[in-house]
Amino acid sequence: MSAAPHWFKSSYSTEQGGNCVEVAVQPTAIHVRDSKALDGPQLTVAPAAWAAFTAFAAMRGYTA
């Protein structure tokens, strides 16, 4: 049995709602979900895909 993922929000998120995501990092997968729909669908990607996505976003200046 694997441990439940530990979810965290972006440091850009506020308690006022808005468009926020939460991320849970595990050794073989990165899970992403809508912070307003905790029981809703999740996107799961490989760590290499997440690294490529975040590098692309940082390169393009998508920080918020």
Image (cartoon, rainbow, N blue to C red):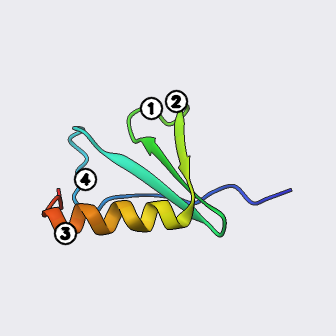
Q: CA distance from mark 3 to mark 4?
A: 21 Å
Of the two numbered discs 2 and 4 on the same chain, state the one appearing first in sequence. 4
Label 1 crowd bin: few (<14), some (14–19), many (20+), radius 10 Å: few
Three-letter code for the amino acid on which mark 1 is drawn: Ala
- The quadrant where residue 29 appears: bottom right
- Return the residue found at the far left: 61
- Which percent across, then down, holds residue 39? 55, 32
Name which residue lies at 52% across and 29% down. 40
Q: Residue at x 69, y 55 (%)?
A: 4
User: Residue 11, can we see it?
Assistant: no
The residue labelled by disc 1 is 37
Marks 2 and 1, how far apart at CA: 5 Å
Tell me the residue at 31%/59% (across/down).
10
Mark 2 or mark 3: whose residue is earlier in sequence: 2
Q: Which residue is mark 4?
A: 13
Compare marks 3 and 1 and give the one earlier in the sequence.
Answer: 1
Residue carrying label 2: 40
Q: Residue type at mark 3?
A: Met
Q: Disc 4 to disc 1, how far (Cα)?
A: 15 Å
